[in-house]
Amino acid sequence: MQLKPEMMAFRFTLNIIFISVAVSLVLAADTLTDPQTFLYFAYGSNLLKERLQLNNPSATRHCVAKLQDYELVFGNHKGVESKRWHGGVASIEPSGRGTVWGVVWRINTAHMTHLDRQEGVRSGVYSPVSVNVLSHGHILTCRTYIMNSRVQALPSPHYLKVIMMGAEQNRLPKAYQDKLKSIKTNKYDGSLPVMDEVCAALKNSKKKKSQPV
């Protein structure tokens, strides 16, 4: 028996609704049932799994989310250039019309100090803050970081490349990826040890994926 087009469309709509509700329920339940972990919203180089896991190996991808009424900016703490990335690094600032897309990672609470150390919390470079991000219609409360005493500065091509790789890896909206690609850099063309580490981690990750199970 062949279903009428109206019935097929109705069933398709029901399936979409069911999937959306299921995803929301999973997100809601997952944030409430694991007190030994915390949610971290990444918007900069930590979008890329291999970069984040250099210092935070317990990090696992939770979902893609957006932070509304904020914008992505670049700069250096008190104007002191980042030795790690040789240029400005990412932060977020309130903006009435802005939206920052990112990735929500789940990390062991015991390893929070690792992330704080990476973000220079102890030396006052960044401050941890709590933000509400939106994913599949569900609000998640996450830890993230905002730079203190930011002086605007262009990022290095290396740093921006890692951000763009992370955006592509996690399939952030194409319009947002295009916006990232349009960001100007300081055109630094020297080598960076952290970039070598990221490239090595990416190579190892690809090797593991290619190995038979």
Image (tube, rainbow, N blue to C red):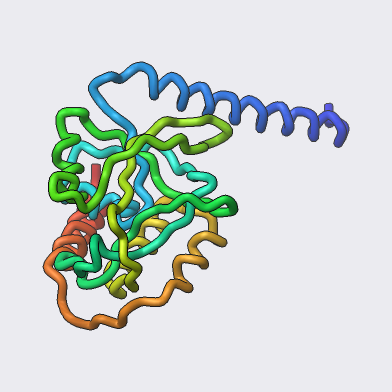
Examine the image and state in which quarter residue 16 appears: top right
Query: Residue 192: x percent and y percent?
Result: 15, 71
Query: Residue 194: x percent and y percent?
Result: 15, 64
In percent of the image, x 63 and y 25: which residue is there?
A: 18
Query: Residue 116: x percent and y percent?
Result: 19, 42
- Which quadrant of the figure contains the C terminus? top left
In percent of the image, x 31 and y 54: which residue is there?
A: 48
- Choose between 134 and 68: the one closer to the eye: 68
Query: Residue 107: x percent and y percent?
Result: 25, 34
Examine the image and state in which quarter residue 109 appears: top left
Examine the image and state in which quarter residue 149 appears: bottom left
Q: Is residue 56 left or right of residue 106?
A: left
In percent of the image, x 41 and y 57: which residue is there?
A: 167
Q: Is residue 6 left or right of residue 204?
A: right
Q: Is residue 143 visible?
A: yes
Q: Residue furthest top?
A: 33
